[in-house]
Amino acid sequence: MFGEQKIAYSGVQPSGNLTIGNYLGAIRNFSEYSEKYKTFYCVVDQHAITVRQVPADLRRRTYETLALYMACGLDPEKNTLYVQSMVHEHAELAWILNCFTMFGELSRMTQFKDKSARHADNINAGLFTYPTLMAADILLYQTDVVPVGIDQKQHVELCRDIAERFNQLYPGTFTIPEPIMAKHGMKIMSLAEPTKKMSKSDENANAVVYILDDRDTIIRKFKRAVTDSGAEVRYDPEEKPGVSNLMSLYSCFSGKTIEEIEREFDGCGYGDFKLAVGEVTADALAPVQASFHSLMADKGALEALMKKGAEEASWYARRTLAKVQKKLGFVQIR
């Protein structure tokens, strides 16, 4: 913690078009934390390069992710918004933390196993060690809480282990962070394979709804969504994963409870329900899309924000890194 105010930190990769899973599981909930915490929200472009990127696409998506942060309600006057690669302390602390992270810990990371299977031709060292970069992201800011989706909880737990190990050797260095998750929308599933998480890297475009999909595309994708046998709109993730996923989405975007949804669509078929889910999703995303396009029209303003955010983030990051370097015995000459 810096001063009296507690710190919240999170980040999103600019490695593909962001989905409604990213929106519901993370970005939409970010703004509420700024009322209680000093908040840092990062575009984690260094994490993105564990998988090969087209440079022009990575640059464009970096701008887009920053614009989406603001379009989803993050006020740059209340939140520190910045790009990871513009704050060199992230990479420097990551190397130090590599030396305090066990090989076995990294080998147990679920996402390393998943990404290795998907990118078998490029199982690089960064793919293996990027959880230590994520730990550096968090620990640099003496973070108290980390808003995450359920699939990132394992990484925050590893971050805690690394921080505790370091603090045992060098007491009082890092704040131990706590993961916090949204009550709803924590894990949005694929529209084509409802037992699998919705992923922005899915090759089947109909399986994924992107934040920037137009209204007709959103409704068409929901109309094609895989449901289950029968025609009853009933929440049962084990027996009816398809319709249960759609009910979760409808609940997130409408604010209605599962019980209210079951009553609303009692006696209706899947066709009517899927159309309703598509419409409520499109309605909710329309103002986000309008704000995004307005922000993207002024590239200079986005670059000024990147610079301002990086300068503010660096001020905090430098203090933690200097503390770590001093405790390790690195020579510091001012």
Image (tube, rainbow, N blue to C red):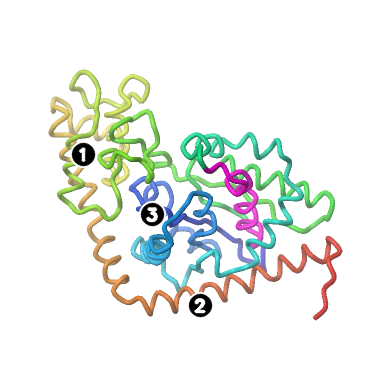
Residue receiving disc 3: 28
Dot placed on the residue nearer the N-terminal end, 2 or 1: 1
- Give SS at disc 2: helix
* Relative vertical location of residue 298 with respect to residue 24 in this rendering, above or below: below
What label does residue 222 carry, if any?
A: 1
Measured Cα–Cα span from mark 3 to mark 1: 21 Å
Residue 292: horizontal and vertical position, in percent? Answer: 30, 65
Residue nearest the observer in this picture, 125 or 147 = 125
Would residue 15 appear left or right of 279 to someone viewing this image?
right
Q: Amino acid at mark 2?
A: Lys
Decide whether residue 239 is among the magenta residues.
Answer: no
Residues rendered magenta in the picture: 122-143
Q: Nearer the viewer, residue 43 or 138?
A: 43
Q: Would you say residue 136 sits in the magenta stretch?
A: yes
- 29 or 294, nearer to the observer: 294
Mark 2 and mark 1 in contact? Answer it, CB < 8 Å.
Answer: no
Is 155 left or right of 225, judged from the image as shown? right
Going by the numbered disc 1, the residue's amino acid type is Phe
Amino acid under disc 3: Arg
Dot 2: few (<14), some (14–19), or many (≥20) neighbours within 10 Å?
Answer: some
Tell me the mark number nearer the camera, choosing from 3 and 1. Answer: 1
- Of tags 2 and 3, which is closer to the observer? 2
Cα gap from disc 2 to disc 1, whole angstroms: 40 Å
